[in-house]
Amino acid sequence: MAVEMLERADEGQLVPDPSRWAVEVRGLRKRFVTRQGLPVGWGFGNAHWIISSLLKYRQKREWKQAVDGVDLKVERGEVFGLLGPNGAGKTTLLKCLATLLSVDEGEAYVNGYSVRTQPDEVRLSMNLVGSGHWAAFDWGMTVVQNLHFFGALYGLSRSERSERIEHTLERLGLTARAKDTPMTLSAGERQRMLLAKGFMIRTPVFFLDEPTVGLDPDGAREVHEFITRELIGGSGTSGILTTHRMDEAEALCSRIAIMNRGRVVACGTPLELKRLVGERSVLEVRAVSVPREVVGEVRALPGVRAAALAPVGDESLEESLRVHCEDVEAIGRRVVGMLERAGAEVRSLESQDPTLEDAFIALTDRRLA
């Protein structure tokens, strides 16, 4: 077994062993201050906050714990997934690891370097690919010109840049748009351009913050293949991936941490997380016009462990109510009766095996949209 920690002789401290761990997080905390100002309607636009600041009217400082004592270890060559609803702290954690945000408490190491005391070494060791960061591109230059510019900043020679740009654009389906400006691209094409920039720069560690957001299924599949075959499989690069898509996490990640309200509530392989549901059955009820208050009533039924509601698809009026229970037949009859009395139209009723999403529901009592 590899040694996880090494002792620093001159200080007597334990430091991470970079030969095994690409990323190690210990008790990391990050909080933000929020203020309560004037009631809505006092002033227009920025005037609301200017008046509130000058008068100090009802200003109350409150601390929001965005990341609350997170411990994680990512092995070399591993894609580690972070699942969680909006506001769970996933992006804030990545920004702390990328040294874009300072750490309030705890410590984190990227490629063996401390984010607190060695930020320059951390930045040279990692690459952050986010969603919507294409706004940082020069919109007056073409896609190729933008990529050449960023490649030059990272010290790549012109021949290296040309070779990598051609390869990544081809793999991401952007070759035909190489000489177009970002302004003429669709949102999905801009996201591909951002991915091309990130994948062109090869570093030991990658942070991928919802990399396939805005992409169609074919585009998302191409990105998945690029990550598994070349980014990770070909070079042994390590990565942390945040996503809202269960299928993406299960396909790309060897281990997954589920975050909720700034904390890691579970961590393991997809199979291990599914087993957290235990021997419970999962009842899926598809219906139309489901009142939200009915979901709370279903959760209160005896024998129900968790229940969550989400749309079936963007173009469908149906919603899926997944109920974790011990007796599917008995609970199913009661749930259907409750929905029909509330005016919902029940379309189907089915018992299913637990999925990764069911593990998420069991731990957070919520669903990922």
Image (cartoon, grey):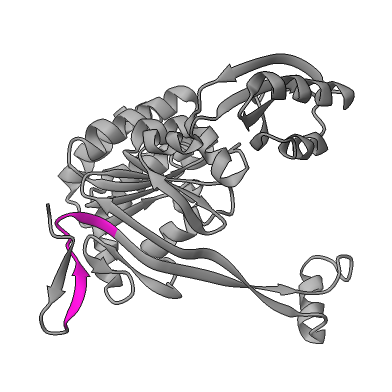
Answer whether residue 139 is visible to the viewer in this image.
no
Where residue 19 appears, x then y in whole percent? 14, 57
Query: Dividing the picture into quarters, in which one does residue 46 lie?
Result: bottom right
What residue do we see at 31% from left, 28% from top?
225
At 18% from the left edge and 43% from the top edge, which residue is drawn? 236
Query: What residue occupies the far top of the structure in this picture?
Result: 348
**Horizontally, is 215 left or right of 269 in the view?**
right
Number of numbered markers? 0
Residue occupying the point 75% across, 19% down: 333
- Counting from the top left corner in percent of width and height, residue 232 is at 24, 39
Report the span colored magenta: 12-23
Q: Can residue 31 be seen in this view?
A: yes
Image position of 252 with respect to 336: above or below: below
User: Residue 118, located in which quarter of the rendered image?
Assistant: bottom left
Say if 60 sits above or below 259 in the image.
below
Image spot of residue 226 (x, y percent) = 30, 32
Task: Please indicate whether residue 249 sits to the left or right of residue 281 in the image.
Answer: left
Q: Does the magenta stretch include residue 111?
A: no
Please tell me whether residue 134 is drawn above or below residue 301 in the rendered image: below
Whole-percent x and y of residue 18?
17, 60
Could you tell me which residue is drawn at 77 percent across and 17 percent down? 346
Q: Pick the quarter of the image with the C terminus.
A: top right
